[in-house]
Image: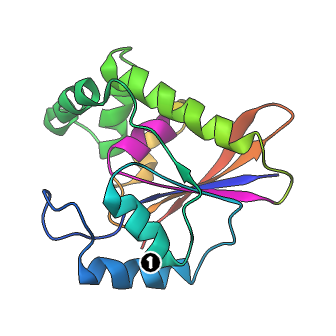
Amino acid sequence: MPMLEIRRHSKRDGAEAVHLSQKGVELARWAGTLMGPFEIVAASVAPRTRETAIAMGFAVNLELPTLKNVNEFMTESQMAAHEVGAPFTRLARLVNHHGAVHDYASAMAVQWQQLMASLGPGDAALVIGHGGHLECGLITLFPDADHDSWGPLFDYMEGARVHYDSAAERFHDVELVRM
């Protein structure tokens, strides 16, 4: 069965920095030695995601377009920081609320499913994305999971591996990847 690996981009110097820091390049280089190969390597339009993939040793062959409601997603997802409960559970409440976070996360899950359509058994795809975004997409794929057990939101270079059943056209078997 095909596999999708999603990872948050590597370190940068401060939340406003566009590019990876030297420590970020080194972390991505190290992480890249532990994974691959990938038939598809996708990154967002943000330079730090492409830089992460390249530092990992993978050429980006697909740029994922920014989803249309990203600003509404960002505004609404900030509300999760003030909620009670484990981080993934707080986000799951927003994803299941059927607002901007739900719409954004659902669109991201569709992007991921479309990536898997061209892969054969044993093939793999890598998506480099952003903290908060990836978690919401993962919750959409696994709405009934025990989100409390998933721990903290993804730190730099963390993410998940999920397998895809091409016949059923659905993801299964999530494995969180921590650094």
| Residue 54 visible in image | yes
Residue depicted at x 49% and y 34%: 108
Residue depicted at x 26% and y 39%: 85
Side (left or right) of 72 relative to 62: left
Magenta-colored stretch includes residue 134: yes
Position of residue 21 measured from the top left corner of the image (x, y, whole percent): 23, 76
Q: Is residue 28 above or below residue 87?
A: below
User: Looking at the image, which is closer to me, 75 or 149?
Assistant: 75
Side (left or right) of 24 relative to 59: left
Q: Is residue 5 above or below residue 179?
A: above
Q: Is residue 91 above or below residue 72?
A: below
Residue depicted at x 57% and y 72%: 58
Residue depicted at x 35% and y 80%: 25
State the count of labels. 1
In what quadrant of the picture does the C terminus appear?
A: bottom left
Mark 1: secondary structure: helix
Determine which quarter of the picture holds residue 72.
Answer: top left
User: Looking at the image, which is closer to me, 150 or 70?
Assistant: 70
Position of residue 82 measured from the top left corner of the image (x, y, whole percent): 13, 35
Q: Amino acid at mark 1?
A: Ala
Determine which quarter of the picture holds residue 148.
Answer: top left
Name the residue carrying label 1.
55
| Residue 157 visible in image | no
Q: Dot 1 surroundings within 10 Å: few (below 14), some, or many (20 or more)?
A: many
Position of residue 109 measured from the top left corner of the image (x, y, whole percent): 55, 34
Side (left or right) of 11 relative to 37: left
Position of residue 78 measured from the top left corner of the image (x, y, whole percent): 18, 34
Magenta-colored span: 123-139
Side (left or right) of 65 relative to 83: right
